[in-house]
Amino acid sequence: MNILKFYERFPDEDSCAVYLREQREQQGVICKKCGGSAHYWLCNKKMFQCKHCDFRTSLKNGTVMENSNLPLRTWLLAITFISATKKSFSALELQRQMGHSRYATIFGLLHKVREVMGKRDGLYQLEDMVEYDEAFVEKATKSDEKQALKKGRGSQRQAIVATMAESTILEDLDTGKDKSCRYFKMKKIDDLKAKTAEKLVRDFIDKEAVLQTDESTTYINLEDCVDVHVHEISSSAEGKFNLKWAHIAISNLKSYLRTYHMVSERKLQNYLDEFCYKLNRRYFGQKLFDRLVIAAIYPYWHNSV
């Protein structure tokens, strides 16, 4: 949704409240006290009330907006900007676009939305054929420390990102075999140890998947984690083909991170979550706004998630 449609759709705070109420009713309101899902709406209070225990839930309660003093319209405007482009906004640029006075407020809002993106994608595992590789990305380092740190692979100036891409083989009679990619996951990791890769594969990849990696010793124990593990030298033509989508994702990630002057390692996972969330929904178009709102109001704190 572009900015003109936003102002047409949400002219005031009341229109935002009506929209969020409809979305919450469609997704289901979960009572924090008893876990009940049956509620009725209190028009005079603008709150949901549990039919079982009478506990009341506001429009913000149980969502990413909980404990925020920002108006609903500010949240929806921010989600509009975030979802309007395949790239991203820095907090400073988002603050400027929204005309907000405090940078820290917009910075916190932006990262809360990114965390929601990660939680939403965290509900799904990768299936079928999955490519796995690691990337090294530059992270924020103090200038007085930067010169003392070594460069290249394994440098303390870089963070390690595990990259997983769910791909399928396509058969074409004229061009031969090729690949199509569906979903991606990226996770910041602390090291290249085999047990780290094993935990990631168990957590995020379906056990019945076919896993493709290079011949690094990091992947020596993955046969027990998936049905089939295929590994080849990544520098070979065949190896590049097998890890095609993982390498494309890594290249696009590095371009995406150039939007920012430098990303701290502490917040890196949030940036990875936003990148993958948008990449996984690259064909959603105008629907991305509504999907992101649903993710933002989803009761991800509930035990069933």
Image (cartoon, rainbow, N blue to C red):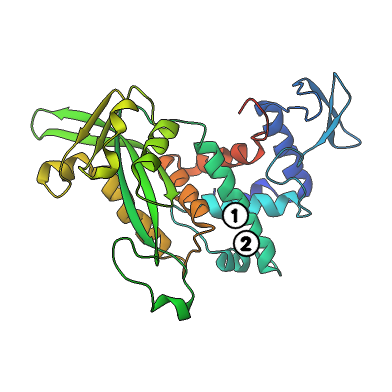
* Residue drawn at the location 20% of the way across and 29% of the way down: 170
Helix, strand or loop status at disc 1 = helix
| Percent coordinates x, y for residue 267 in the rendering | 54, 57
Please say whether residue 99 is visible from this viewpoint.
Answer: no
* Location of mark 2 (residue): 107
Question: Where is 299 relative to 64, above or below?
Answer: above
* Residue drawn at the location 51% of the way across and 36% of the way down: 122
Helix, strand or loop status at disc 2 = helix
Q: Amino acid at mark 1?
A: His
- Pointer 2: residues within 10 angstroms few (<14), some, or many (20+)? some
Q: Residue furthest right?
A: 44
- Pointer 1: residues within 10 angstroms few (<14), some, or many (20+)? some
Taking 187 as reference, is 3 left or right?
right
Q: Nearer the viewer, residue 152 or 54?
A: 152
* Location of mark 1 (residue): 111
Contact flag, marks 1 and 2 (Cβ < 8 Å): yes
Q: Nearer the viewer, residue 60 or 233?
A: 233
Question: Where is 149 relative to 19, above or below?
Answer: below
Question: How many marks overall?
Answer: 2
| Percent coordinates x, y for residue 78 in the rendering | 62, 54
* Residue drawn at the location 65% of the way across and 46% of the way down: 9
Please say whether residue 263 is visible from this viewpoint.
Answer: yes
Quadrant assignment, res 293: top right
